[in-house]
Amino acid sequence: MILAHRPTLQEVTEVIPGEQSQLMMAFTSEVGYDNLGSLALFLLNGLYGAFAHSRLFRSVREEAGLAYVTGSSLDRSTGVLTAYAGLEAEAAAQAGALMSEQMQKLQEGDFSEAELNMTIQTVAGQLRMSNQEAEGRLDYQFSRFLKGHGDVEQMIEQLQSISRQEIITAAQTLKPHTVYLLADREVTRE
């Protein structure tokens, strides 16, 4: 079931004492498995936060030092892309702003051919390994059923044929839905 866009961003903060805080951001795309933009959105997720070379890891964790861990995942059955960061509660506002900024840059087409090629290579490697674990096999077979993909190599060819503009268009379908902070202590929002 595709999750629809929200007219306004929902922001939720919960405080539960613990070791670190967790920031989650959800973006809705209204793009599911059966949509032509699904594979382009899959690549966008790779550019944004799915891998160590992705924007979130490089900008939020490595360059700004705002998070212990960060990344993103795409649920292609609901069209929801989630970004996350494990961080100190005081860094949540700054990290959230940087995470949003990186998404906006991708929506504007601010990514290099080198970033895209690295993402395609990484996704191709994952697809080739997908037959080694149940969840990967299930995701691939479901996608194959809905989209009419052939074997893994044919799907990789489809991914390689996705244009830069198709990725930008897919990125532009994403709208902020919810920001959730599970704080390990009280913090003030700025």
Image: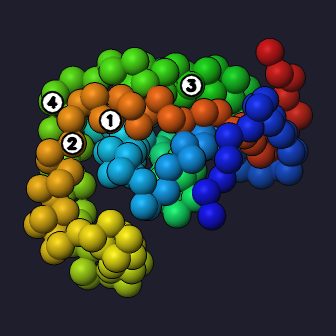
Q: Which residue is pictured at 66% across the width and 53% down the height? A: 3
Instruction: Mark 2 vs mark 4: give the one in front.
Output: 2
Residue 157 quadrant: bottom left
Number of the label disc, if any, that sits on residue 114: 4
**Relative image position of residue 60 (x, y in whole percent):** 48, 28
Q: Is residue 64 left or right of residue 26?
A: left
Q: Closer to the observer: label 1 or label 4?
A: 1
Amino acid type shown at disc 2: Ile
Q: CA distance from mark 2 to mark 3?
A: 24 Å
Which amino acid does the dot numbered 1 rest on? Answer: Ile
Quadrant assignment for the C terminus: top right
Residue marked by disc 3? 100
Mark 2 touching mark 4, by CB under 8 A? no
Query: Does the CB distance between marks 1 and 2 fall below 8 Å?
Result: yes
Residue 162 is tagged as: 2
Residue 29 position, x and y percent, is 54, 43
Q: Secondary structure at mark 2?
A: loop
Crowding at dot 1, Cα within 10 Å, few <14 / some 14-19 / many 20+, comes out as many
Q: Secondary structure at mark 1?
A: helix
Kind of residue at badge 4: Ala
Numbered circle sitting on residue 137: none
